[in-house]
Amino acid sequence: MLNVAKFGGTSVADYDAMLRCANIIKDNQSTKVVVVSASAGVTNHLVTLSQQLLSHQEQQDIINQIRGIQYNITQQLSAELQLNRQIDEVLEHLTALVEQQNTVQTAKTTDSILACGERMSSILFAEVLRSIGVNGLTFDVRQVMRTNSLYGKAVVDIEALALNCEQQLLPLLQQHVIVTQGFIGQDGLGNTTTLGRGGSDYSAALLAEACQADDLLIWTDVVGIFTTDPRIASSARAIPEISFGEAAEMATFGAKILHPATLIPAMRSDIPVFVGSSREPQAGGTQIRQHVESKPTYRAIALRKEQTLVTVKSPAMLHASGFLAQVFAILAKHELSVDLITTSEISVALTFDNPPGSTQALINQQVLEELEQLCEVTVEHGLSLVAIVGNNLQSTTQLGSNVFNHIEDVSVRMICHGASANNLCFLVAENDANQVVETLHDKLFM
Ligand code: ADP
Ligand code: ASP
Ligand code: MG
């Protein structure tokens, strides 16, 4: 048996958290590959360093705060001095990158800056493993995670990853538990890339696939996938099992618990995924698999904030063919991925995700100008996407009344339904979003 386990930012936030995770691995001999995120807060600091025009002093302060987070961990370990040297090496590299970014800001340098968090946490976590008698070894994932050069949302070369893992990673598993970095990769030019915020889940799923693992274990700060974000509705409860299809819709439509792409490799290679809490490993969790016994009409509600709605309008669309192809060609050229679409006679509404902490402005001036040559364009912000996830939704009766009757006083900006049996999505104003989720959760799940 071979498992890949992933620990998110809060699970590797400090020494106690890392120790709990190390004990989970010690208790589960099948876990041979460990993927870690940066310690909680570090990536956000790195985003600030890479994005904003800060004074030299402000930059130094942030770097010192990052050092503080990591030194708090090293001071609990007997290898403290040697670890501090390794952390300082990464931070010296970070300082040089920040100076470079001060001169010319590039997406390439941004990715190298963002990668520093996972580089440090993976060094520390391997040592915590060794301190409890597990033969942990830090492995630089950039040796195997080959990507293209789309900095900030790099695309992984799946075949190269499989081959590289077979040659470089699998042989190490005989003797070691490998601790490697989520979120980061390397392009063909040897430059560091990142897979997008929250990307460690996806890295772990890709590595599970490449190593032909039997299971993927996602250890986080909640005891599984809940019926909705427990921070929004206190009545949310953990779901014992959920199908790949439903979980993928949840991840895509905002349940921050999993990066949207996580389930793609798992589904493709039929690798069951477990989601549980590293704080309470005995508390059970959620099993995500191909076949599940229960298939309720309503399984969960996901919420994604910061959505951008773009409406393109042109009389040229009336009875014409090819207009949408032109719109999509522009979006594709700028690597923009569309989430929801609705159309009317002469206009089309499209939504885009604009996640917090994203390193690039989404619909920038250039995209707007190109679209405006074709049609009238309106851009709206401040919207949230609510997704009702379940089974056979496309053929369920009373779906509309079960959902919309309860939120009559809220204006619904856009509705998408019918493309998937697993979801019904709609847009509401950001200010209404939490209340809508709470109300619907009470009506559909209590
Ligand atoms: P990690 O750092 O381990 O990757 P994240 O913060 O990215 O953890 O994801 C876990 C968080 O996702 C939870 O703390 C919870 O607030 C949020 N979340 C959103 N939707 C859900 C859901 N349906 N079930 C569980 N957690 C959810
Ligand atoms: N550290 C990265 C982030 O905060 C990746 C991850 O945690 O999955 O986005
Ligand atoms: Mg996450």
Image: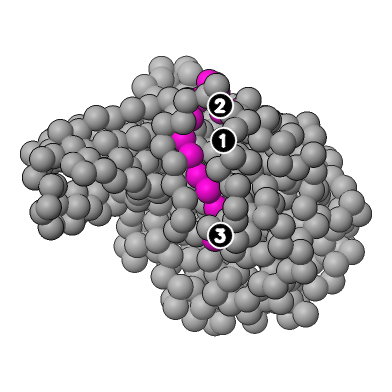
Query: Taking 38 as reference, is 330 left or right?
Result: left
| Residue placed under numbered mark 1 in the picture | 404
Q: Counting residues from the N terminus, which is met first, the one under dot 3 or under dot 1?
A: 3
| Residue placed under numbered mark 2 in the picture | 408
Query: What range is drawn magenta here?
Result: 421-434
Amino acid carrying mark 1 in the image: Phe
Q: Secondary structure at mark 1?
A: helix
C-beta proximity under 8 Å, tags 3 and 1: no
Q: Is mark 3 within 8 Å of ligand 1?
A: no
| Residue placed under numbered mark 3 in the picture | 395
Looking at the image, is 158 positioned above or below residue 407?
below
Query: Taking 116 as reference, is 151 left or right?
Result: left
Residue drawn at x 13%, y 47% is 318
Name the quadrant containing residue 274.
bottom right
Cα separation, mark 2 vs mark 3, equals 23 Å
Amino acid carrying mark 3 in the image: Ser
Residue drawn at x 91%, y 54% is 282
Q: Would residue 165 be counted in the magenta stretch? A: no
Q: Counting residues from the N terminus, which is met first, the one under dot 2 or under dot 3?
A: 3
| Residue 43 visible, this orientation | no
Q: Residues within 10 Å of mark 3 (few under 14, many from 20)?
A: few
C-beta proximity under 8 Å, tags 2 and 1: yes
Amino acid carrying mark 2 in the image: Glu
User: Where residue 63 sits in the image (x, y, percent)?
Assistant: 54, 29
Looking at the image, is 101 positioned above or below residue 420?
above
Viewer-side residue, 351 vs 89: 351
Residue drawn at x 79%, y 48% is 238
Q: Secondary structure at mark 2?
A: loop
